[in-house]
Image (cartoon, helix red, strand yellow):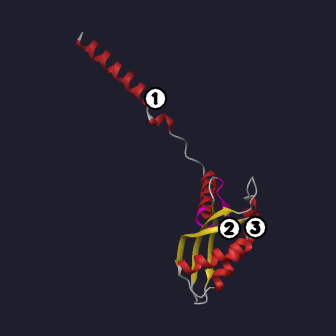
């Protein structure tokens, strides 16, 4: 009788352990990718990190009056480099009932970025306040339906 009880308890323990194993996270483990799949994943991650790290795209936020001119690396006349990321706040001065087309800012991204580079290269001072003023004035001369209210530097590294 004692042996039968031990035998039944042992069987119940095995059944209980088996049920717990099927419900555990070990049953949900994914198979390790092959060598080719790992290489593709690494390439995708590298491309994504490059896009995050350095961007030359002008991005306009549709929900607010802010935009980003992207990243710049500019050689100064002092044999140094400026590595900056510029954002801006703008307002619509078109007078139109529906407002000016925000796509015009995106479509003219090359011109906007060129004007920023020219402004910085022309500047004698590389202080944030001075550059902000010069860039804002130059961009406002270029834009007709928008006015740049403020320039913001997300990154400003002089090397």
Q: Kindly state the secondary structure of the residue where label 2 is placed.
A: strand
In x, y percent, where is residue 151?
Answer: 59, 70
Q: Residues within 10 Å of mark 1 (few under 14, many from 20)?
A: few
Q: Residue at the spot x=63%, y=81% of the render?
A: 120
In x, y percent, where is residue 132?
Answer: 58, 76
Q: Is residue 13 magenta?
A: no
The region drawn magenta spans: 52-62
Q: Residue at the spot x=62%, y=77% of the render?
A: 73
Asked which quadrant contains residue 136, the reply is bottom right
Point out the tag, 3 or 2, that comes first from the N-terminus: 3
The circle on residue 22 is 1
- How far is mark 1 from mark 3, CA to CA? 59 Å
Given the current orientation, which residue lies at the most extreme left position? 2
The circle on residue 87 is none
Name the mark nearer the viewer: 1 or 3: 3
Name the chief secondary structure element in magenta.
Answer: loop
């Amino acid at each position: 009788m004692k042996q039968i009880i031990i035998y039944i308890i042992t069987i119940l323990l095995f059944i209980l352990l088996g049920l717990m194993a099927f419900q555990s996270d070990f049953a949900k483990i994914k198979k390790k990718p092959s060598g080719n799949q790992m290489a593709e994943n690494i390439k995708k991650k590298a491309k994504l990190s490059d896009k995050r790290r350095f961007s030359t795209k002008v991005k306009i936020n549709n929900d607010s009056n802010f935009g980003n001119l992207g990243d710049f690396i500019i050689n100064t006349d002092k044999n140094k480099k400026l590595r900056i990321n510029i954002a801006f706040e703008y307002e619509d001065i078109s007078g139109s009932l529906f407002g000016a087309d925000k796509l015009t800012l995106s479509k003219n991204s090359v011109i906007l970025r060129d004007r920023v580079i020219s402004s910085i290269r022309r500047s004698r001072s590389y202080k944030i306040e001075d550059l902000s003023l010069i860039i804002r004035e130059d961009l406002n001369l270029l834009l007709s339906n928008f006015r740049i209210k403020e320039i913001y530097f997300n990154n400003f590294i002089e090397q």
